[in-house]
Amino acid sequence: MTEKIVQHRQAADQFYKVFGEQPTHVAQAPGRINVIGEHIDYCGGLVMPMTIKQQTRGYYRFTGRSEVRVFSDRFDALNRFNPLDVMRLPSGSWGDYVQGLLKIGAHRQLGRGFDLWLTSDLSGGGLSSSASLLALLAMVNHHALSEQIVDDSNSSFRLTLALLCQQVENNFVGVPSGVMDPVSILMGGLIKLDCRTLKFERLRPIPESHCLVVMDTGMPRTLAASGYAERVREIAQIESFHSGVNHRQGLAQLDAGTADSILSGLSDPKLKARARHIFSEQARVEKAAEALSEGNLSRLGHLMNESHRSLSEDYQVSCGPLDQITQASRDSGLALGARMTGAGFGGCAIALVAKIDVEQHNAVVAASYQKQTGVKPMLLIAESGNGARIDAL
């Protein structure tokens, strides 16, 4: 009996305990890491995300009622939602993602409710657990309203769902996130994504000889939401100084001459540093995609190191634990490169390591980091995952 069948049977048993029926379908939405291209998605930049095996899973069945009931295994809580209650305001809990998706996703049809049991092994910050949840909810909601499952190959509609997920997070939950996370999760694999046009290119995978190691600092991202919002405001402030630049055009993809003009015209050293990160990170994504296509992993690792330095010094979204764990990885002599991934202020970093060296690398990093912080980090190999999908049970 495969591990997946065991998981499904155990989850079905839990579903029955909560709802008194058996689930008919399972939706699975992966987490993601970002190989390079951090904090430029909301500037219209290029990013290089990769989905991973860790995921959010949701077991569900349609009920014929209008009410939506969702149980979270992580929070051990059952929430009930009336999709027709468009006046319900955010409460600051995980239920906001469900309520926001139902509201902005125009769930208005009577008798299209469902019961949903959620579980996840996306424990580390920076693996995009919120976007994973939203992508799963968007897929289930579409199935409920249309009685159709989104095909794996329907990229156009999956991009539409990604934009819906971004709207929910921006306009209901209140986090000014970019579109990278939901696009990555709904598309799957390793891609280079233009966040301004939503055009994406599937990239050559990391060679079999190497892998990306996720290094969870164990530090909650307590400042991530507020820090993220502050950076978005700073970028808007930079754009406001230059009439030829607007958010629709995207600060990240300006030509070199305009970028140099903006940098030279910024008198505020903080804003100059922010802009310097945006322009340099955009260039690093282009170079990283070239390095990957050429199989030049040393160059890719060097670019990852440069990215972390920029995020730490110019964009100031790293923190002590992220700097310590990435430095421990570099100091081991076994990593080609290491950088934070995600919004920052805690959560996870990644390292590019030869598979033959992973065990030794992880032992060295864990010992060094624990000695410095007193916290034992969680380290795991990030295997590339598929995009969000739904299967009948």
Image: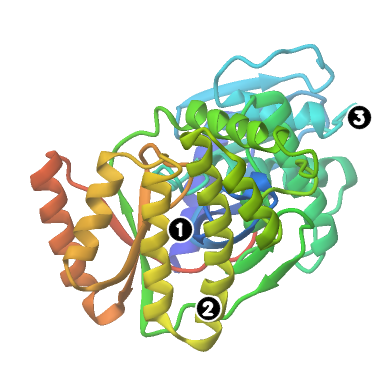
Q: Of circles 1 and 3, which is in front? A: 3
For the point 46% across and 42% down, the residue is 315
Task: Measure the C-alpha gap from mark 3 to mark 2.
Answer: 42 Å
Relative to the observer, which residue lies in front, 155 or 146? 155
Res. 136 visible in picture: no
Relative to the observer, which residue lies in front, 352 or 144? 352
In the rendered structure, which disc, 1 or 3, sits on the residue that comes first in sequence?
Answer: 1
Residue 109: mark in rendering = 3
Q: Could you tell me residue 235's position as x and y percent?
A: 62, 37
For the point 61% across and 76% down, the residue is 203
Spot the residue most to the left: 371
Helix or strand or loop: what does disc 2 sit on? loop
Q: Could you tell me residue 117's position as x and y percent?
A: 58, 37
Q: Neighbour class for label 3 at 10 Å: few (<14), some, many (≥20)? A: few
Task: Measure the C-alpha gap from mark 1 to mark 3.
Answer: 35 Å
Mark 1, residue position: 6
Mark 2, residue position: 205
User: The C terminus lies in which quarter of the figure?
Assistant: bottom right
In the rendered structure, which disc, 3 or 2, sits on the residue that comes first in sequence?
Answer: 3
Q: Of circles 1 and 2, which is in front? A: 2
Q: Could you tell me residue 366's position as x and y percent?
A: 16, 55
Helix or strand or loop: what does disc 3 sit on? loop
In the rendered structure, which disc, 1 or 2, sits on the residue that comes first in sequence?
Answer: 1
Q: Could you tell me residue 64's position as x and y percent?
A: 83, 32
